[in-house]
Image: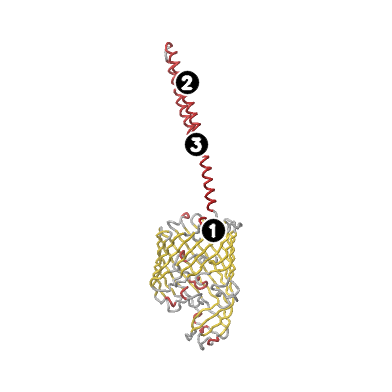
C-alpha cells in the first residue's frame, strides 16, 4: 500500500472524533444534575475506547507502510540485477547486432510514342549505357530498380550502410557501401567507401523516394542520373541556429563525368555548402551551391558519324560542373500529414576543355578510319529543372516539373567539324511532366505520370506515360529534407 493515503485517513477519522466529543459535551451540559454523573462516566469510557481503537489503527497503518517500502526496495533491486544479467548475457552474441534491413520494390507500365530503346539526349555525350539513362527503356510492363538496404551501428564510433540494386537487366550493382563516424564532436562527420555524392539536392535521394518516376534531365546529362563517389567525404555542421553545412569529397575518377576506373585520370573532387532555416511555423527552406571537378583520361561513348558509320568517341581533359539548388517547403504549422507543398529547383553549368578522339569501327569514314582523329575540344553546357508537388489532401499529391537543357555550340580544332559527330550537334532539350500519386501508407505509393519530351532532337517529340508502383518492406529510414 502506498504511503500517500495515510494522512488523509488520520485526518478524516480525527475529524469525526472531534465532532463526537463536541456532541457529547453539548449533551452533558443539557442533562439534569441528577443524571450528569452516570452520563459523564459513560462518555469517558467511550472516549477511552475511541482513543485505544485509533492508536491500534495508526500502529497497523505504520506497519503496512514499512512493509510496502521494503517490498518496493526489493523489487527495484531485483529488476536492476535482472537487467544487468541480461546485458551481460547479450555481450558478444549475435542478438546484440540488430541491423535495419529494408527492400524497395519498383515497377511500371510504360507507353511511349517513340521506340524507347533508341532514346538519346541530343547535344550531350551519353553518360552510360543506353539502358541506364533517360525515360522508360521498354514499352508495357517492366521492373524498375529494386534496392536491398542494410544499416546498423557497428559500435559507438561507426555506422555501416549497404545498398544493393537489382536493375531491370537482371544485373546486381553495388550502389552504396560505406562506414560513417559517430560522435566525432564539433559537428564533424567522416564517411568512407562507395556513396552517393552530397552535391546538389536530388543526388543523395534514392529513386524510390523521388517525387517523379524518373530523374531530371539535368542529372541525366551531367551525372548519368546520379553522381557516385568511391572515396571519402568530410562534412561539418555549424553550431548555429541557422542550418549551415560544408562538405568536401575526394574519390576515384570512376563515374561520369569522369572516366571508368582509368589510372591515368586525376580523380574526382567535390565541394558543397548548404544554408537553411524556418520561416514561422509553416515554412522551411534550404539553398546550396556545389562544384564537381574531374580530369577524365578516356571517357568514351559509341555513336555514328555523318555517314552512319559506327564510331568510338573518347574525351580527355578537364571537366568542371557548378550547381545551385533551392528547396522551399510549406505545411500548416509544420504538420504535413493533411496538406503540404514543396518547390524544388536546381541549375548546373558544365565546362569541358581537352582533346577528342574519334575512331571508326571500320576502315573508312569521317573520323579517319580505325586509326582515328584526335583534335581539340571545348564546350559550355547548362541545364535546370523546376518542380512543384502539392499534397492537397491526405495521401493524394499532384506535381509538375519542367526540364530545360542547352548543349551550347561545341568548339573543335582544325580537323574535326561538328557534322562529323551528329550526337554532339547543338540542341536545347526540354520536357514537361505532370504526375498524380496516391499513398496507401507511408510504405506504398501508386503513381500516374505523363511527359512530353523533346530530348531526341528536332521533329522527334516523344509522349510518355507511366503507371508506377513503389513499395517498401522492412526498415524504412527517414528521408532527407
Residue at disc 1, secondary structure: strand
Please state which of residues 216 and 132 is positioned toward the viewer in this rendering: 132
The span from disc 1 to disc 3 (Cα, nearest Å) is 42 Å
Quadrant assignment, res 291: bottom right
Residue 68 is labelled as 3
Give the answer, above or below, for where 79 lies relative to 221. Answer: above
Q: Which residue is mark 1?
A: 153
Q: Which residue is mark 2?
A: 48
Give the answer, above or below, for where 194 lies relative to 186. Answer: below
Numbered disc in front, either 2 or 3:
3
Horizontal and vertical percent for residue 49?
Answer: 46, 22
Report whether 159 appears left or right of 117: right
Please state which of residues 324 and 37 is positioned toward the viewer in this rendering: 37
Horizontal and vertical percent for residue 99?
Answer: 50, 59
Give the answer, above or below, for where 414 lies relative to 196. Answer: below
Horizontal and vertical percent for residue 126?
Answer: 50, 76
Query: Are circles 1 and 3 on residues that touch, CB within 8 Å?
Result: no
Quadrant assignment, res 459: bottom left
Characterize the local packing of mark 2: few (<14), some (14-19) or many (20 or more) Cα atoms within 10 angstroms. Answer: few
Report whether 352 appears left or right of 332: right
Count how many numbered circles sit on residues in the image: 3
- What residue is at 50 percent from the left and 78 percent from the top? 123
Residue 135 is labelled as none
Report whether 20 appears left or right of 373: left
Characterize the local packing of mark 1: few (<14), some (14-19) or many (20 or more) Cα atoms within 10 angstroms. Answer: some
Characterize the local packing of mark 3: few (<14), some (14-19) or many (20 or more) Cα atoms within 10 angstroms. Answer: some
Residue at disc 3, secondary structure: helix
Amino acid at each position: 500500500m502506498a504511503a500517500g493515503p495515510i494522512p488523509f485517513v488520520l485526518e478524516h477519522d480525527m475529524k469525526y472524533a472531534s465532532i463526537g466529543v463536541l456532541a457529547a459535551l453539548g449533551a452533558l451540559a443539557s442533562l439534569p444534575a441528577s443524571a450528569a454523573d452516570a452520563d459523564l462516566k459513560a462518555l469517558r469510557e467511550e472516549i477511552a475506547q475511541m482513543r485505544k481503537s485509533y492508536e491500534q489503527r495508526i500502529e497497523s497503518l505504520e506497519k503496512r507502510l514499512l512493509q510496502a517500502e521494503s517490498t518496493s526496495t526489493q523489487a527495484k533491486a531485483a529488476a536492476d540485477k535482472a537487467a544487468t544479467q541480461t546485458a551481460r548475457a547479450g555481450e558478444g552474441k549475435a542478438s546484440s547486432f540488430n541491423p535495419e534491413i529494408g527492400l524497395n520494390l519498383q515497377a511500371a507500365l510504360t507507353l511511349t510514342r517513340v521506340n524507347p530503346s533508341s532514346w538519346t539526349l541530343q547535344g550531350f555525350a551519353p553518360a552510360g549505357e543506353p539502358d541506364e539513362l533517360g525515360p522508360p527503356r521498354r514499352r508495357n510492363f517492366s521492373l524498375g530498380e529494386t534496392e536491398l538496404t542494410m544499416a546498423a551501428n557497428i559500435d559507438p564510433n561507426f555506422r555501416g550502410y549497404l545498398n544493393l540494386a537489382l536493375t531491370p537487366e537482371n544485373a546486381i550493382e553495388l550502389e552504396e557501401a560505406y562506414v560513417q563516424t559517430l560522435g566525432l564532436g564539433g559537428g564533424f562527420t567522416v564517411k568512407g567507401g562507395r556513396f552517393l555524392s552530397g552535391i546538389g539536392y536530388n543526388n543523395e535521394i534514392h529513386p524510390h523516394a523521388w517525387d517523379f518516376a524518373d530523374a531530371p534531365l539535368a542529372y541525366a546529362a551531367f551525372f548519368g542520373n546520379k553522381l557516385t563517389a568511391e572515396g571519402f567525404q568530410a562534412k561539418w555542421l555549424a553550431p548555429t541556429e541557422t542550418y549551415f553545412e560544408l562538405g568536401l569529397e575526394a574519390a576515384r575518377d570512376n563515374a561520369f563525368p569522369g572516366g571508368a576506373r582509368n589510372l591515368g585520370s586525376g580523380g574526382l573532387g567535390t565541394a558543397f555548402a548548404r544554408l537553411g532555416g524556418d520561416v514561422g511555423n509553416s515554412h522551411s527552406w534550404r539553398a546550396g551551391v556545389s562544384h564537381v571537378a574531374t580530369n577524365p583520361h578516356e571517357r568514351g561513348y559509341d555513336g555514328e558519324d555523318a555517314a552512319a558509320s559506327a564510331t568510338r568517341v573518347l574525351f580527355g581533359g578537364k571537366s568542371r560542373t557548378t550547381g545551385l539548388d533551392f528547396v522551399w517547403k510549406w505545411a500548416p504549422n509544420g504538420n504535413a500529414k493533411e496538406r503540404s507543398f514543396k518547390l524544388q529547383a536546381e541549375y548546373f553549368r558544365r565546362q569541358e576543355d581537352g582533346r577528342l578522339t574519334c575512331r571508326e569501327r571500320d576502315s573508312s569514314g569521317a573520323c579517319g578510319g580505325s586509326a582515328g582523329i584526335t583534335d581539340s575540344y571545348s564546350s559550355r553546357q547548362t541545364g535546370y529543372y523546376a518542380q512543384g508537388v502539392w499534397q492537397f489532401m491526405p495521401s493524394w499529391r499532384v506535381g509538375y516539373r519542367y526540364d530545360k537543357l542547352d548543349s551550347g555550340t561545341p568548339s573543335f580544332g582544325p580537323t574535326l567539324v561538328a557534322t562529323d559527330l551528329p550526337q554532339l550537334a547543338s540542341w536545347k532539350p526540354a520536357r514537361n511532366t505532370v504526375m498524380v500519386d496516391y499513398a496507401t501508407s507511408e510504405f506504398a505509393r501508386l503513381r500516374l505520370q505523363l511527359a512530353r519530351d523533346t530530348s531526341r532532337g528536332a521533329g522527334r517529340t516523344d509522349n510518355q506515360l507511366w503507371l508506377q508502383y513503389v513499395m517498401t518492406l522492412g526498415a524504412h529510414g527517414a528521408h532527407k529534407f
